[in-house]
């Protein structure tokens, strides 16, 4: 049996002297692994770089087998990021998170979102907000989505500027003001596609998604957040210091 799909390379590991096991986030088949024969060759190594967009043909005798894959390059996002340390950290962080997805479980929105992040790697003002939105989509697809549509206390849909660390729901300015030191700031760009994202907004966004990623996905599995993500946040500003997390009782 076989299928064809497009996929973003997440990682590779060597198998013997010449071959490699490739791990990809595919559009229709989810996170999928396969054997690339000659994957460590001079011809294929440049193709098998994390974030590269590939056209894949997968073949196996049975569905449950690892299978072998052949790849053709569609777009080399990695090559365009080689001179930008922040963009490389973005790639490393996103691909590390995508590897947490259940194997062979389709997540087409995450695939499209990852492509949107990588297509904007030459513009930090574009890829950083997209990465935060991707992280929130990742949480939702894993069953831990935030509800930013209305105030958890009043049901209001206007003036939403906080998020509760307990419920993951938005809170309005009026309802949240007495508890502001216990709440996360909700940057406007996460609920308004027309809003721009300042440096502080990005810090607030990464701080928000990072808390729930750690609490709901990584810590329960005994894993830390990707080290690349922590290094990336260090480039955005000291506002992301752990000392600035809400004092949750």
Image (cartoon, grey):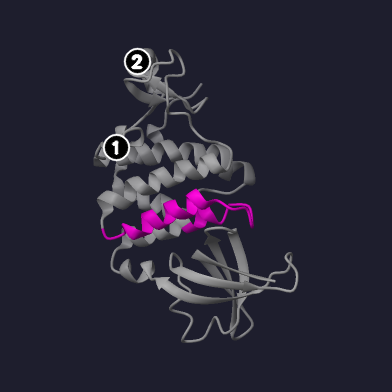
Q: Quadrant of the N terminus?
A: bottom right
> Which residue appears at 54% of the width and 64% of the height?
24
* Crowding at mark 2 (Cα within 10 Å: few <14, some 14-19, many 20+): some
Residue 119 counted in the magenta span: yes
Q: Position of residue 30 (x, y in %)?
A: 58, 57
> Which residue appears at 31% of the width and 68% of the height?
80
Q: List the residue tagged with mark 2.
A: 177
Which badge, 1 or 2, comes first in the chain's sequence? 2
Q: Do the residues labelled 1 and 2 touch (CB within 8 Å)?
A: no
Q: Position of residue 146 (x, y in %)?
A: 49, 32
Q: In this view, does 51 lie to the left or right of 5?
A: left
Q: Is residue 98 left or right of residue 162?
A: right
Residue 9 appearing in the image: no
Q: List the residue tagged with mark 1.
A: 201
Q: Which of 78 and 217 is in front in this view?
A: 78
Q: Position of residue 192 (x, y in %)?
A: 31, 33
């Amino acid at each position: 049996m076989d299928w064809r799909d497009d996929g973003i390379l997440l990682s590779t590991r060597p198998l013997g002297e010449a071959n490699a096991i490739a791990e990809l986030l595919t559009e229709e088949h989810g996170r999928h692994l396969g054997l690339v024969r000659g994957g460590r060759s001079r011809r294929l190594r440049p193709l098998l770089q994390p974030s590269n967009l590939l056209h894949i043909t997968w073949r196996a005798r049975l569905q449950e087998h690892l299978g072998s894959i052949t790849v053709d390059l569609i777009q080399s996002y990695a090559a365009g990021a080689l001179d930008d340390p922040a963009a490389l950290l973005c790639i490393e962080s996103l691909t590390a998170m995508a590897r947490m997805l259940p194997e062979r479980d389709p997540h087409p929105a995450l695939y499209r979102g990852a492509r949107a992040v990588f297509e904007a790697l030459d513009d930090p003002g574009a890829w950083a907000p997209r990465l935060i939105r991707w992280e929130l989509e990742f949480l939702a697809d894993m069953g831990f989505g935030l509800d930013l549509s209305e105030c958890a206390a009043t049901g209001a849909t206007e003036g939403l500027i906080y998020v509760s660390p307990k419920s993951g729901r938005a809170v309005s300015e009026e309802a949240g003001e007495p508890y502001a030191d216990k709440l996360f700031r909700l940057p406007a760009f996460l609920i308004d596609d027309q809003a721009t994202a300042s440096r502080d907004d990005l810090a607030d966004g990464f701080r928000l998604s990072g808390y729930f990623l750690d609490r709901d996905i990584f810590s329960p599995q005994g894993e830390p957040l990707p080290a690349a993500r922590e290094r990336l946040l260090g480039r955005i500003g000291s506002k992301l210091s752990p000392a600035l997390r809400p004092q949750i009782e």
